[in-house]
Structure formats: structure tokens, C-alpha cells
Image (tube, helix red, strand yellow):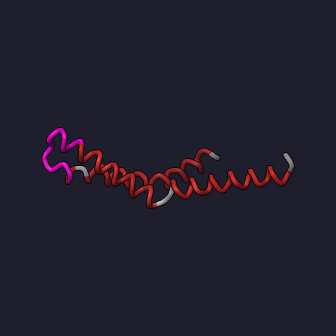
Amino acid sequence: MDLEQRVEKIEDRNSKVEIDKAWETSWTRRSLLVLFTYLAIGVYMWSVDISKPWLNAVVPAVAFMLSTLTMSFFKKVWIKVFNK
């Protein structure tokens, strides 16, 4: 494999990695995770006959959203501590 092909292969891989990173940090992904969390917990609460399951399912969905929003902060702190 010549140099140009190797460079092209690396650039293709980098492009895919950048797209994956953009997806991981996107609001679309976060919103879908919150929606699916809410629906799954709501269905579970409804199936075990908890009162107001759809209202009560909001709490864990919001908590999950907050955890996804704070992960980038804690990642930066962890990297600073780990790299010392």
C-alpha cells in the first residue's frame, strides 16, 4: 500500500471518528435518551400499577438528562487529575 492510500485510509477513519464524537455530544442523542428513558420507566410504572406513572417517570428522566449534561465537566476534571 502506497503512502497516498494509507493517508486516505487514515483520513476516512478520522472522519468517521469525528462523526461518532459529534453524535455522542449531540442534543439529538441526549433528547432521544431522555425520551426513551421516560417511556421505559413510564411503561414499567404503569404495568406495576403505580399511581400517576407518567408524572412519576419525569423524575428519573430528568435525573438522567442532568447526568449526561454533567459528564463532560467531570471528564475534564478526571483528565486533569489523571494526567498529573
Of residues 11 and 27, the one nearer the viewer is 11
Q: Position of residue 64 (x, y in %)?
A: 36, 50
Q: Which residue of the protein is positioned furthest toward the top in this rendering? A: 48
Q: Report the span colored magenta.
A: 44-54
Q: Position of residue 37 (x, y in %)?
A: 33, 48
1 versus 12 height, above or below: above
The reply to whether the magenta stretch includes residue 45 is: yes
Of residues 52 and 60, the one nearer the viewer is 52
Q: Which residue of the protein is positioned furthest toward the bottom in this rendering? A: 27
The reply to whether the magenta stretch includes residue 8 is: no
Q: Name the residue: 20% across, 43% down.
A: 45
Where on the picture, by quarter, is residue 14? bottom right
Of residues 61 and 14, the one nearer the viewer is 14
Q: Is residue 58 left or right of residue 72?
A: left
Q: Position of residue 53 (x, y in %)?
A: 18, 48
Quadrant holding the N terminus: top right
Q: Name the residue: 59% across, 57% down.
A: 19
Q: Name the residue: 76% across, 54% down.
A: 8
Of residues 7 and 34, the one nearer the viewer is 7
Q: Name the residue: 53% across, 50% down.
A: 75
Q: How many numbered circles does the render carry?
A: 0
Q: Position of residue 54 (x, y in %)?
A: 20, 52
